[in-house]
Image (tube, rainbow, N blue to C red):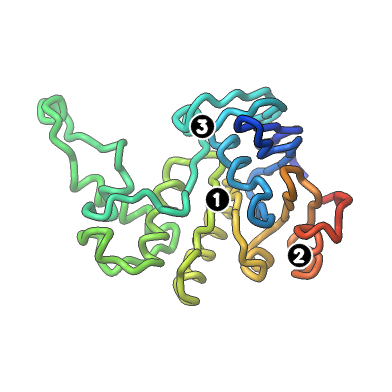
Amino acid sequence: MSEPLLEARELVKHYGSVEALRGASFTAYPGEVVSLIGDNGAGKSTLVKCLSGVERPTGGTLLFEGEPLELTSPTDARDHGIETVFQDLAVAPDLDPAANLYLGRELRKPGVLGWLGVLDKHEMRKRAAEHFYRLGVSLQSIDVPIAALSGGQRQSVAVARSVAWASKIVFMDEPTAALGVVQRERVLDVIKRVRDEGIAVVLISHNMPEVLSVSDRIEVLRLGRRVARFKGPDTSVEELVGAMTGALTQEDAA
């Protein structure tokens, strides 16, 4: 296995007297899907916030490509090639998929028009269509507002937007929540395509069959600590649930 891309060692996070992380560790490698699972209150969301620059840990160490890393903001994380797909998607419903893809990173027309702030909508739509095609994202139209798309298509656009700008790692928080079977499979297919491009995908999910179907590795949090690690193809739902509930407490080497 290659050197870790992103590694957390004994992270601690306090919110006043509440200890959300109690020495949590986590590892992600290039070109893999690693799922982060745990019961409600296990510390998953807090850990992801610390790894994506939303929160700063109270203690512990972050390493990125073997070097110490201190993330001060999500923008700082993006500068390192780290993107996040949040559960609420954070898309602009009145804008079309291309505009959402380039939201905050809009292309301007060359020359004087660009200096005047005129956007190059044609070029953005062209590049967006190429990007969606490469990831296998099928949209009924690239010119309609996001609000007019199905739930699965909106989720796929959110994933594709993060992938467009992530050169190293993408965190996906419950990306298939509230989706139907067909839509869920489309999003999982996009996740696999992202992995195959060499980008690390961190999947946060409560859906154990889904986790097993797409994960190369699985890491389990309980009460703010990592309690187990598994290779995705070599484990079962029963083992995962056992680790989450405390029946399994000793970490298994990946």
**For marks 1 and 3 on the same chain, the one whose residue lies earlier in the sequence:** 3
Question: Disc 2 vs disc 3: Cβ atoms closer than 8 Å?
Answer: no
Q: Secondary structure at mark 1?
A: loop
- Report x, y in % for residue 174: 53, 58
- Which of discs 1 and 2 lies nearer the camera? The answer is 2
Q: CA distance from mark 1 to mark 2?
A: 31 Å
Position of the N terminus by quadrant? top right
Of 222 and 237, which appears nearest the observer? 222
- At horizontal 74% and vertical 61% (from top left) the residue drawn is 232
Residue that label 3 marks: 77
The amino acid on which the numbered mark 1 sits, given as a three-letter code, is: Glu
Q: CA distance from mark 1 to mark 3?
A: 20 Å
The amino acid on which the numbered mark 2 sits, given as a three-letter code, is: Val
- At horizontal 69% and vertical 66% (from top left) the residue drawn is 212
- Report x, y in % for residue 82: 52, 37
- Which of discs 1 and 3 lies nearer the camera? The answer is 3
- At horizontal 68% and vertical 43% (from top left) the residue drawn is 28
Residue that label 2 marks: 241
